Amino acid sequence: MIRETVGHLRDLPRYRQILTTLIRYGYQDVVAALRLESIVKPLERVALGEEVALHDRPRRLRLICEDLGPTFVKLGQLLSTRPDLLPENYTTELSALRDDVRPFPFAQAEAILVEEYGRPLDACLASIDPTPIASASISQVHRAVLHDGRVVALKIRRPDLHKVVAADLDILKNLAQLAERHLPNLAVYRPMSLVREFERTIKRELDFSVELRTLRRCQTQFAADRTAHVPFAVDELSTPRVLAMEFIAGVRVDDVEGLRAMGLDPAQVAVTGARILIKQIFQFGFFHADPHPGNLRVLPGGVVAPLDYGMFGQLDLRTRERIADLLIGLLGQDVDRVLKALEDLDVRGEEVDPKELRRDVGELVQTYCDLTLASIDLGVLLGELVGMIRRHHLQIPPDLVLLIRSLVTIESTGRALDPKFDIARQLEPILRKLAVRRYSPRRLFDQAAGTAEDLQRIATLLPDLLSHSLESIKRGELNVKFDLQGFERLVRQLTRASNTLAVGIVISGLLVASSLIYRGGATSLAQVGYGLGLALSLWLVWNMSRS
C-alpha cells in the first residue's frame, strides 16, 4: 500500500509531513477520504476521529501552505487565481499568502554566485549589499553595483530548491490521482490537469533564463513607448539560477502621497498603467499575469515600470478576438454574443444544461442593462461571470483565468488611485478595433489565400490517394460502396461553393489593389476598383442568400 501510494520510499518522510500538517490544521477528513491513514504516525492518527472545524477552513488551508514551504506557497497562490475552482472565501484567504519569507544566509547566496559565474565576486561586481532587499519563496534579491557604475538587482534562487520542488510535485501528482479516484466532488475539476498546469508554471519560474527572455521580449515591445520603462538586463551575469537586471527605485503605484510628492496626478498614473497592461493583453497577447501594486513602480514623469517578469500569460490573435467578443457582449448586454464567445473560448463542461446556462447568462447581463458603461464595475461583473461558470462546472483555460485576474487587478489598483477610474472606457477602443480588424480587406484576403492553399494541397494529394485506393481495390484489399443518390445535387453545391470562394478572392484582391492605387494618387482608377468590388460584393451576398 505504501509503495503504491508514495511511489518511492525516499518521499515517505515528506509525505508524512504533508499529511500530518493536514491533520494538524483540521483537514483530517481529507486524509481519511484519500485512505492515507496508514502512512500517518500513530500519535497523529488519533486526530482522525475528531470533529472537523468548518468555519475557518480557508484560513487553515493558507496556514498549511505557509507551513509546507515554497512549493505549497506557490500552489496556494495559483489556487487564489482560480475562482472557477474554489469559493470566494478560499481565494480571498489564499491571496493573502505572503511571498516574503525568511532570507537564506548571504554566505549561501555568495556561494551560488561564485558557482554560477565561475570567478570571485569582486571580479564581477564593484560591491554587493549582503542584506537582501526582498526575500520570496523561490528567490531573494540583493542590490549590487557593477564596475561601470550601473546599479542592478541580483535575483538568486534558493539553494537546492529544485530538489524540494521535484519531490513535492511527485507527491502532488499522486495525491491528485487519489483525489480523482476517491473524491468525486473534486474529480469534476480534474486535479491531475491542475497539477500539470502548476508543474509547468513553477518550473518556468525556477528557470530564470525564461524570465530573462520575457524581459527581452517586453523591452522590444515597449521600445517606442515613453510611458513605460522595462528594466535592462545584464546577460553576462544572468544564468538559470541568477537574474541580473536594472535596480528600479521609484514609487509604488498605489502610494498616492508619494506620487503627489513627485508632482504627479494619481488619476493620470492609473490611466497610464492601465493602458500599458491593456496593450500587453490585446495588442501583444503577452501580458503580466500578476500586476499587483508591489510589481509596479512609478518613475519621474509618470513613467510606469513593471517589475518581476516571472509570471506571464500568452494569447494568440484568435483568442484575443474571442475575448474581445466576450467583453463587448458583457458590456453591451448581448446574451447571444456572450454564449458564443464562451463556446469559442472552450469554456465548456461535460454535463451542462444549455437552457439553464442561457438563463443564468441572461440574468447576469440583465442585471447591468440599466447601467451606463462608466458605472459598471468590471471586476464585480467578471467575478459574477466566473461564479456562474463555477456553478455550471465549466472548465476555463488557464490563460483566460490569468487574463480575468489581471483585468480585475488593474481596475482595483486604478480605483485606489482614482475613485472615478473607468477601465471600461480604456478597454472599449481596443476591443472595437479587435472586433473590426477581423473584417479588414487584408485579413479577408489572407484567409482566402490560406483557403486556396489548402484546396491546392488537397488537389495535389488527391490523384496519389485515388491511385493508391484503386490499386488496393485491384488487389482486393479495399471494398468501396458507392451511393450515388443526390450526387448531382452535391456537385452543384460544390461548384457553387468554389465559385463563391473565387469571387471572394477577387473582391479581396480588388479592395487591396484599389487601396494601394489610391495611396499612389490614382484616385479615379481606385474609385473604379472600389465600385467594382462593391458590385461584386452585393452579388456575392445575394447569391449566398439564395443558397
Image (cartoon, rainbow, N blue to C red):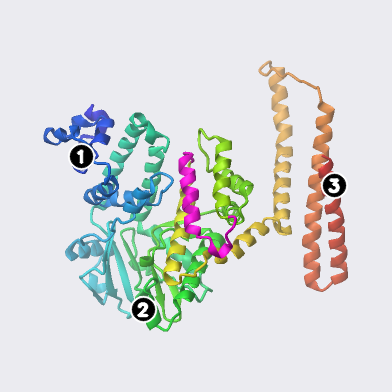
Q: Residues within 10 Å of mark 1 (few under 14, many from 20)?
A: many
At 25% from the left and 67% from the top, the residue drawn is: 119
* Above or below, comparing residue 519 to residue 41 in the picture: below
The mark that comes first in sequence, 2 or 3, is 2
329 in the magenta segment: no
The mark that comes first in sequence, 1 or 2, is 1
Looking at the rendered structure, the kind of residue marked 2 is Gly
Q: CA distance from mark 2 to mark 3?
A: 63 Å
Q: Looking at the image, is mark 2 or mark 3 nearer the viewer?
A: 2
Where is residue 344, by image quadrant? Answer: top right
Looking at the rendered structure, the kind of residue marked 1 is Ile
Q: Nearer the viewer, residue 322 or 333?
A: 333
Judging by the rendered image, the residue that carries numbered circle 3 is 542
At 77% from the left and 67% from the top, the residue drawn is: 516
Residue 389 in the image: x percent, y percent? 49, 44
The segment highlighted magenta reads: 369-394
Secondary structure found at label 3: helix
Image disc number at residue 258: 2
**Residue furthest to the front:** 370
Residue 224 in the image: x percent, y percent? 54, 74
Q: Is residue 278 left or right of residue 2?
A: right
* Above or below, comparing residue 113 to residue 65 in the picture: below
Looking at the rendered structure, the kind of residue marked 3 is Trp
Residue 62 in the image: x percent, y percent? 27, 50
Q: Is residue 59 left or right of residue 220?
A: left
Q: Nearer the viewer, residue 163 or 255?
A: 255
Q: Residues within 10 Å of mark 3 (few under 14, many from 20)?
A: few
* Above or below, comparing residue 44 to residue 109 in the picture: above
